[in-house]
Image (cartoon, helix red, strand yellow):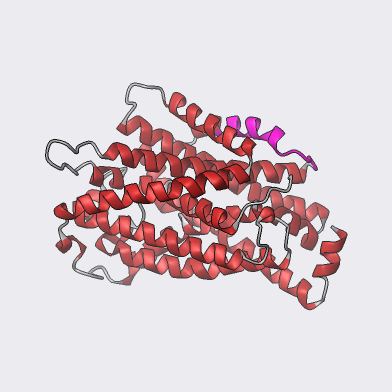
Amino acid sequence: MEKEIVTNKQVICLMILFIMGSTLVLGVGAEAKQDSWIAILTATAVAIMIVLIYSRILWLFPGKDLFQILELILGKYVGKVVSLLFIWYAFHLGVLVIRNFSEFMKVVALLETPELVSALILVLLCIWGVKEGIEVLGRWSQFVLPLLLAIILTTIILSLKMADWTNIRPIMYNSFGPITKAAFSVFSFPFAETVVFMMILSGAKDQKGYYMIYLKSILIGGLIVLIINIRNIVVVGHEFITNTAFPSYAAVSLINVGEFLQRIEILVSVVFLFAGFIKISICLLAVSNGVARVLNITQYRTLVTPIGLIMLSLSLIIYDSIMEMQEWAFIYYKFYALPFQVIMPVIIWSLCEIKVKRGETKKLAKNA
């Protein structure tokens, strides 16, 4: 992968948008009902611990992405095999997110339009963005994120008059069981999905700033998800959230200020699509970079279009219905993602620390 330099601030903006991604569309923590905000806080705390491991791995090998690190500590052939596993995860995640957004557009805006059309437009935009490079994506996210946050803040303020704070009580009525399950789900989706950034972060301007990049992103992203979740609960209630496909969109659609400010949910759709564009683009970039590393191709951009179109094709057949999509996202995904998000990174981190104690990291990096 060509060396592309992005500032820490740009990476943080990218990561926050990545966290917002399909989280804003599908919502999180519904298993905990009115206590979902507690689940989000718990998941954020746990996520901080795991992203410190991600940061440590990158910190030990400055200027290297995950694929390069795997070859350094595992050897060329085993490293490539493990790299393929992470490539699959990023690829599959990108496919899932494409389907999330094509379903969203189909349900809320383009009822009579074939799902392929909206998905194709989104994927073509992502292909263009990735071909422009992470530097362009970083600058774009740095410009767009404040605008999206302003839209979110506006919708929250306008929702306050409809808020029923009794919806958030009784607190911990269902004990710790549902909260723990919901926290596990929120941890895996969206926070631990940031493992994908390990696959592309060889070009961070401050090679020692990974800790702050991850910590700031998780804390700010977690705060945004928390505030939106509380807004949804107090506006429409947990029962409505459980029974609707897109709770944030539904909550904002209730906003009606006189006769001059209606249909504000259109702005929310823009927020969803911009965040989704970044999430899909990051996944596509990670896959393209990974395949280029495995195949020893110097220009990852030559792979972007075919990989993007394959992701598009699979997104159209991966689910039979929107109900199946939600079932996978909230019931099965956390177990599927656990090896990629926690188990494998912990093993890799342990191996890296062993290499450090033996004094092998500098030698490995020098020979790479």
Q: Residues in magenta? A: 296-311
- Residue 125: x %, y % from top left: 53, 32
* Quadrant containing the C terminus in the rendered view: bottom right
Q: Position of residue 234 (x, y in %)?
A: 20, 57
**Residue placed furthest toward the left:** 258
Q: Residue at x 51, y 44 (%)?
A: 278
Q: Residue at x 23, y 36 (%)?
A: 263
- Residue 304 magenta: yes
Nearer to the camera, 297 or 179 = 297
Q: Does residue 254 appear in this view?
A: yes
Q: How many marks?
A: 0
Left or right: 89, with 64 as reference point: left
The quarter of the picture where residue 173 lies is bottom left
Q: In percent of the image, x 52 and y 59: which residue is there?
A: 192
Answer whether residue 93 is visible to the viewer in this image. no
Residue 92 lies, in percent from the top left, at: 56, 43
The residue at 56%/62% (across/down) is 213
Q: Is residue 264 magenta?
A: no
Q: Main secondary structure of the magenta part?
A: helix
Q: Residue furthest bottom?
A: 357
23 is higher (above) or lower (below) than 61: above
